[in-house]
Image (spheres, helix red, strand yellow):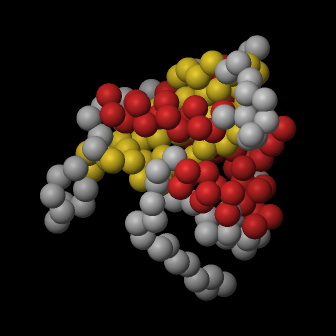
Amino acid sequence: MRQPVAVTIREGKHSDLQQVSSLWLEMINLYQSLNDQAWEPAPDGPEKYREWMEETLAQEERVLLVAEVEGEVLGFIHGRLGSSFPTMAPRRKGFITDLAVAAAHRRRGIGRRLAEAVSQWFAQQDAVEVRLSAATSNEAAIAFWQALGFEPLTYGMWRQLK
């Protein structure tokens, strides 16, 4: 791990969303480099993501946390609350949908701090577990999450039809 930086983890706000959508596009470009067929962003993908994050800021069941250094957003994590399928015992769950840290600032503990902060937020909302998905080809992400105590649960599969 490189030298840690003095990072503030806080809830995202409207003025962060342009930087957040840029980080999202950086994350999607990484995914696309791992499997270009599965991760093709829409031409207006960053704008659509920004709009989705606007909705997040207005919903109590979702959270956007950002990692900030001197006014610059270097990373973010998005999570939402959910519950079990109706056929399963009821359990309030946290779902991490996205975590991104600017490439130049990775391996400094920012992702770990964001993951810990969103886990605390989920616990405060009475979630009993946290779930996420990681691309099978993203070995760095899988190792990161496993180092934080996450374990494989299901194996997602896909097949391109056209």
Q: Residue furthest right?
A: 104
Residue shown at 73% from the left, 70% from the top = 35
Q: Is residue 83 left or right of residue 7?
A: left
Task: Give coordinates of residue 10: x percent, y percent.
Answer: 56, 20
Up-down relation of residue 9 to residue 49 (above or below): above
Identify the residue at horizontal 25%, vertical 56% (top origin): 84
Q: Is residue 158 left or right of residue 74?
A: left
Q: In this rendering, would 124 be left or right of 74?
A: left
Instruction: Specify whether 41 is left or right of 125.
Output: right
Q: How many numbered badges does the structure rendering display?
A: 0
Is 111 located above or below residue 44 in the figure?
above
Residue at screen point 77% across, 47% down: 26
On screen, residue 79 above or below 134: above
Residue at the top extreme? 70
The answer to which image quadrant residue 107 occupies is top right
Residue 70 placed where, x, y %? 76, 14
Image location of residue 134, percent across then percent down:
57, 60
Quadrant of the frame with the C terminus = bottom right
* Nearest the eye: 3 or 34: 3
| Rendering coords of residue 120 (x, y %) | 41, 31
Q: Residue at x 63, y 38 (%)?
A: 111
Q: Eyeballing the image, is 157 above or below 52? A: below
Image quadrant assignment for residue 32: bottom right
Q: Is residue 54 visible?
A: no
Residue 5 in sight in this render: yes
Q: Quarter of the image for the N terminus: give it.
A: top right
